[in-house]
Image (spheres, rainbow, N blue to C red):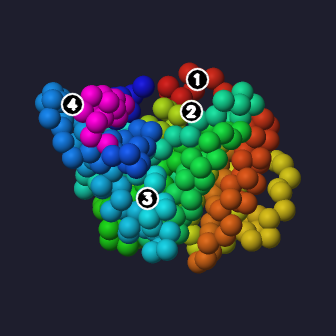
């Protein structure tokens, strides 16, 4: 259990004790798994317990504000369910200090794989965040499922705030991953091939950005077998992974867009043989449940073909 998760667990336990001893919760209070329910009093709690509960409530409220910015009106209240059970790794704050939260939905199926979902690496692609939230909430509703999933739906909150692809420092996070070729190629590629497009600036150094560091922390912490990165608006499925057949899916055709110095696909697949599926939604939502099932099945086969990973590999990233 990492520090932040423990933090939430303590807060939840505190609330549980409070509710049990003092009977604060009314009969219809909705008690979530990880986060404190909305109890009004904290009398009898120690200062540490009160602080933990205040932290949990503040994380929840920040999460809800972000969901309001990302999600279309009709889906907001439903997808805010995500905020009842969010956690945060210690490294996961944006340049301007906004939290980058995640939720886990584990699996008891030994054949299941570990799938890490990254949403909104680009801040101006809110539909990608909404899709990631749809998946997280569907897993929660399903209860049991084949694969273990971690969903980090809103990775670039400063970009979201500005409605920019880049983070607050003007860096394209999807060119900032420390690929083995970064030092030799990332800035040259940007100068020549990308013609200094500010939307594709890779940063001055590999993994210079705190948001990139947050993603790497998730990779080391969760040790995924398969990564899904959700974007808009190119309306394709783009795969960096072993050679294999693609399942039929007419809403988003499979098409190789290639990967770039500093991109997630090059970092994870080329350098570490962890397959990456880039879901590029169009400007409209697709059937989230159907796509998630296709992705889950595809991930199992892709992980099998890409071979066994050692835990030590993640230590050296
Ligand atoms: Zn994008």
Foreground label between 4 and 2: 4
Foreground label between 3 and 1: 3
Q: Position of residue 14 (x, y in %)?
A: 28, 30
Distance in Å between CA atoms under marks 4 and 1: 35 Å
Decide if ligand 1 comes within 8 Å of the CB at mark 4: no
The correct choice, above or below, for 167 with respect to 97 in the image is below
Q: Quadrant of the N terminus?
A: top left
**Residue underneath mark 3:** 80
Q: Nearer the viewer, residue 180 or 53?
A: 53
**Residue underneath mark 1:** 311
Decide if ligand 1 comes within 8 Å of the CB at mark 2: no
Lower position in the chain sequence, tag 1 or tag 2:
2
Q: Nearer the viewer, residue 164 or 117?
A: 117
Q: Are marks 1 and 2 in contact (CB under 8 Å)?
A: yes
Q: Position of residue 183 (x, y in %)?
A: 46, 46
Which residue appears at 32% of the width and 68% of the height? Answer: 161
Q: Position of residue 39 (x, y in %)?
A: 26, 45
Q: Mainly helix, strand or loop, the magenta region? A: helix
Report if residue 126 lies within the magenta region. no
Which residue appears at 61% of the width and 77% of the height? Answer: 284
Instruction: Kindly identify which numbered label has been placed on residue 223.
Output: 2
Which residue appears at 35% of the width and 55% of the height? Answer: 63
Indicate the secondary structure of the residue bearing disc 4: helix
Distance in Å between CA atoms under marks 3 and 2: 27 Å
> Around disc 4, counting alpha carbons within 10 Å, would you say few (fewer than 14), some (14 to 19), or many (20 or more)?
some
For the record, the magenta segment spans 9-25
The correct choice, above or below, for 34 with respect to 70 in the image is above
Distance in Å between CA atoms under marks 1 and 2: 8 Å
Distance in Å between CA atoms under marks 3 and 1: 34 Å
**Residue underneath mark 4:** 49
């Amino acid at each position: 259990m990492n520090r932040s998760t423990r933090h939430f667990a303590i807060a939840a336990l505190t609330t549980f004790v409070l509710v049990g001893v003092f009977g604060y919760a009314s009969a219809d209070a909705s008690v979530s798994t990880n986060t404190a329910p909305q109890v009004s009093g904290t009398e009898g709690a120690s200062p540490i317990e009160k602080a933990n509960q205040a932290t949990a409530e503040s994380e929840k409220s920040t999460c809800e504000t972000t969901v309001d910015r990302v999600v279309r009106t009709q889906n907001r209240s439903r997808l805010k369910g995500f905020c009842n059970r969010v956690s945060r790794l210690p490294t996961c704050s944006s340049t301007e200090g906004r939290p980058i939260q995640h939720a886990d939905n584990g699996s008891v199926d030994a054949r299941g794989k570990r799938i890490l979902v990254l949403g909104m690496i680009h801040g101006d692609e809110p539909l990608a965040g909404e899709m990631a939230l749809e998946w997280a909430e569907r897993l929660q509703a399903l209860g049991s499922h084949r694969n273990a999933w971690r969903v980090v739906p809103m990775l670039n909150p400063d970009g979201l705030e500005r409605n920019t692809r880049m983070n607050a420092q003007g860096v394209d996070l999807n060119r900032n991953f420390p690929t083995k070729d970064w030092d030799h190629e990332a800035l040259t590629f940007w100068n020549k091939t990308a013609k200094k497009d500010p939307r594709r600036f890779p940063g001055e150094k590999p993994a210079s950005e705190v948001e990139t560091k947050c993603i790497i922390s998730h990779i080391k912490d969760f040790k995924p077998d398969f990564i899904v990165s959700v974007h808009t608006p190119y309306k394709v499925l783009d795969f960096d992974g072993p050679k294999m057949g693609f399942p039929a899916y007419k809403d988003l055709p499979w098409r190789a867009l290639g990967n770039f110095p500093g991109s997630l696909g090059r970092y994870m697949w080329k350098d570490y043989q962890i397959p990456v599926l880039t879901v590029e939604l169009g400007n409209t939502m697709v059937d989230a449940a159907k796509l998630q099932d296709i992705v889950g099945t595809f991930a199992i086969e892709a992980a099998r073909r890409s071979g066994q990973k050692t835990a030590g590999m993640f230590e050296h990233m």
